[in-house]
Amino acid sequence: MTHPAREFATEVVERLRREGFQSLFAGGCVRDLLLGREPQDFDVATNATPEQVRDLFGRRRTLAVGASFGVMIVLGPDHVQVEVATFRKEGPYHDGRRPASVAFCEPEQDALRRDFTINGMFYDPLESRVLDYVHGETDLAAGVIRAIGEPRERFREDKLRLLRAVRFAATLEFELEPRTAEAVREMAGELLVVSAERIAQELRKMLSHPHRRRAMRMLDECGLLAVVFPELPDDPASRERAGERLHLLPPKSGFELGLAALLSELPVTAIVRPICRRLKLSNHETNRIVWLVEESSTLDEAATWSMARLKRLFAHPDSRQLLQLARAQRLAQGRDLHAILHCEEFLARTPPEELDPPPLLTGNDLIGLGLSPGPAFKDVLEQVRDAQLNGEIDSADAAILLARQLGGGESG
Ligand code: ATP
Ligand code: MG
């Protein structure tokens, strides 16, 4: 079994060790290896300074992304990269998010600055040995998210940890250790000192995860949901329906579908769009979310739609997600699925190339007929397109004939 990132990270550890430095895998990758999951990325911790890391691997193979915090990136083959960070302890926090300074130190202190015990372990890949100064292995085995040290103090330093606590508990199906949970509940309101971008980044991870319902429920229980989404109605029934929608989406659904499902009972212009703006989502994300929420309510009428209308909708790249959302919505409300099944039957019997076939008539053709661009022009094009999609015409000649009847003569 080859695993390029892991192999390269092991090489980096070896190389540092040969030069006489300490070096270990650290943090999230150790947690994931112990859980038997594929780490997303490998972090190496060492007592070599960033300059020494740079000298050892060479300027061309290193990036000084956070050298002042002791962090270097070492570039490997095939776009693999490993973060190599000098063991560090952090100075005081002033802004609720980042330490004012860092100092290089021993591995034990480096473990103590990390957020949760399961994220605070080191692993020696050369000797297959775990170095655990924070009893992370016990908590990993018990399924517990526990702040390292005094929970309140750790959350006071960095409020993003409030969301991280819930994310790890939800996605790993762990429980928050009671004192950690209590501190999250007590300090939930302080999350807002964290930038919208960082909050959104955590939401992306939670809402795209198969356990998105658990994540939102846990956020709700500790008061964070109301801080991130004060617009969500406070009544238990609507929270319950939101949870069901999240649960009913396919496990692998993306962030946009997840957020659309959470917000789908709310008005788009007054609430959904402003939420996207506040979270500083990308335009692409915002447009997808808004489209999904808006269109999902129109699907109720789908059984009465023309072929053209159905084809236009399902030519949209996100229409499959729209069906997922609409299905979850209706099931959560205890409504029937007629409209959804109608759409699915339509999709099942319609070859994909028929959803958006090349047009029989273009704007240029209309100009050739003597029509000049304007509202009527657009209207003729749309009607001819509808006739094509409805199967009423199937040749360029028929399209031109229809265009003439519709108004090609008027301004010609
Ligand atoms: P994932 O990559 O799945 O989000 P992770 O635990 O690897 O989880 P990263 O953000 O990649 O998270 O951080 C790597 C490690 O750095 C963490 O495991 C933890 O030890 C430490 N860490 C990250 N963010 C914080 C934080 N806000 N406070 C304290 N330690 C942190
Ligand atoms: Mg990571």
Image (cartoon, grey):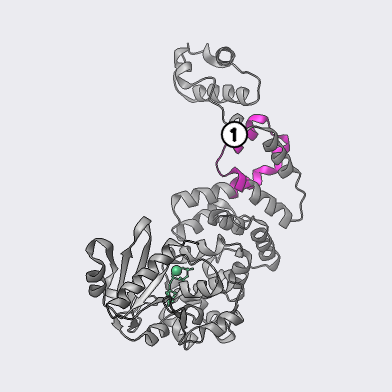
Q: Position of residue 1 (x, y in %)?
A: 50, 62
Residue 321 covered by magenta stretch: yes
Residue shown at 59%/58% (left/top)? Answer: 263
Q: Quadrant of residue 20?
A: bottom left
In depth, the one of 321 and 399 nearer the eye is 321
Above or below: residue 277 compared with residue 30: above
Is residue 105 shown to the viewer in this render? yes
Secondary structure type for disc 1: helix
The disc labelled 1 sits on which kind of residue? Arg
Q: Quadrant of residue 67?
A: bottom left
The reply, left or right, for residue 142 in relation to residue 278 is: right
Above or below: residue 59 compared with residue 347: below
Q: Quadrant of residue 264?
A: bottom right
The reply, left or right, for residue 171 in relation to residue 41 is: right
Q: Magenta region's main secondary structure?
A: helix
Report the image quarter containing ligand 2.
bottom left
Residue shown at 69%/50% (left/top)? Answer: 327
Q: Disc 1 marks which residue? A: 312
Above or below: residue 271 compared with residue 125: above
Mark 1 surroundings: few (<14), some (14-19) or many (≥20) residues within 10 A? some
The residue segment tinted magenta is 293-322
